[in-house]
Image (cartoon, rainbow, N blue to C red):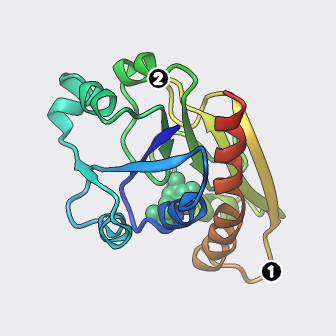
């Protein structure tokens, strides 16, 4: 099975996913799709020799949503890892139940439009939550909304800042996301 990773940022999750599947018998990271020129994930892709596709807003939202390009690359599953654009229905229809996302909080709380990166952790801290975590879910037409696939928790510690909480969440993502992707794909 060939997967495409969609990312807009540093690409620390993409790096872990690429490393995890490097010698995998059945699953291969075949493409990195990015909507931000200069994003760190593009250097990660170059480092591991993974082809990249830099996408434009016009074609993504008002064109074919790059479905033709993904099908031409024989992509079977789409993995969102810090991708900040909403997924258009054309892409969801082309990949039914084959698109998953990771969110750095325990959905359904602290999700939705504008809830990404440090904003999520600031909201968790402001609400004085004692725990936070990660959520992997199927992607549907709404932000951070689809059927849940996996969750893992971690404590929010006294004195935590958005940065220290983000670090703990990243560690949880890097530990679990590659294995969750593997189980999800092997079951489908
Ligand atoms: N959706 C969120 O965006 C962040 C991306 O980080 P990276 O993988 O680019 O380092 C991750 O925390 C992920 O949960």
Identity of the residue drawn at 60% across and 62% down: 20
Horizontal side, residue 6 vs residue 184: left or right: left
Q: Which circle, 2 or 1, is nearer the viewer?
A: 2
Residue on which disc 1 sits? 158
| C-alpha gap between disc 2 and disc 1 | 42 Å
Horizontal side, residue 7 vs residue 121: left or right: left
Horizontal side, residue 104 vs residue 117: left or right: right
Is label 2 in a helix, a strand or a loop? Answer: loop
Identity of the residue drawn at 18% across and 41% down: 56
Please state the horizontal and vertical placement of residue 163, each as a whole percent of the image.
58, 77
Quadrant showing the C terminus: top right
What is the residue that sits farthest to the bottom in this orientation?
159
Horizontal side, residue 135 vs residue 68: left or right: right
Q: Residues within 10 Å of mark 1 (few under 14, many from 20)?
A: few
Identity of the residue drawn at 33% across and 65% down: 49
Q: Residues within 10 Å of mark 2 (few under 14, many from 20)?
A: some
Residue on which disc 2 sits? 95
Please state the horizontal and vertical placement of residue 48, each as a whole percent of the image.
38, 68
Please state the horizontal and vertical placement of residue 139, each as a whole percent of the image.
54, 31
Please state the horizontal and vertical placement of residue 44, each as a whole percent of the image.
37, 69
Q: Earlier in the sequence, mark 2 or mark 1?
A: 2
- Vertical placement of residue 186 versus 165, above or below: above
């Amino acid at each position: 099975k060939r997967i495409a990773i969609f990312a807009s940022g540093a690409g620390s999750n993409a790096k872990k996913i690429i490393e995890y599947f490097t010698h995998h018998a059945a699953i291969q990271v075949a493409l990195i799709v990015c909507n931000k020129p200069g994003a760190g994930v593009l250097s990660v892709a170059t480092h591991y020799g993974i082809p990249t596709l830099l996408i434009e807003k016009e074609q993504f939202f008002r064109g074919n949503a790059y479905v033709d390009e993904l099908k031409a690359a024989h992509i079977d599953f789409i993995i969102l890892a810090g991708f900040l654009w909403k997924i258009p229905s054309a892409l969801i229809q082309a990949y039914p139940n084959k698109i998953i996302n990771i969110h750095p909080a325990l959905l359904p709380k602290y999700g939705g439009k504008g809830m990404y990166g440090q904003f999520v952790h600031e909201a968790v801290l402001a609400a004085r939550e004692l725990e936070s975590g990660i959520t992997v879910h199927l992607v549907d037409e709404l932000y951070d909304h689809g059927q849940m696939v996996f969750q893992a928790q971690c404590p929010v510690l006294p004195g935590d800042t958005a940065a220290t909480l983000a670090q703990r969440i990243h560690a949880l993502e890097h530990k679990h996301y590659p294995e969750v992707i593997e189980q999800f794909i092997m079951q489908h």
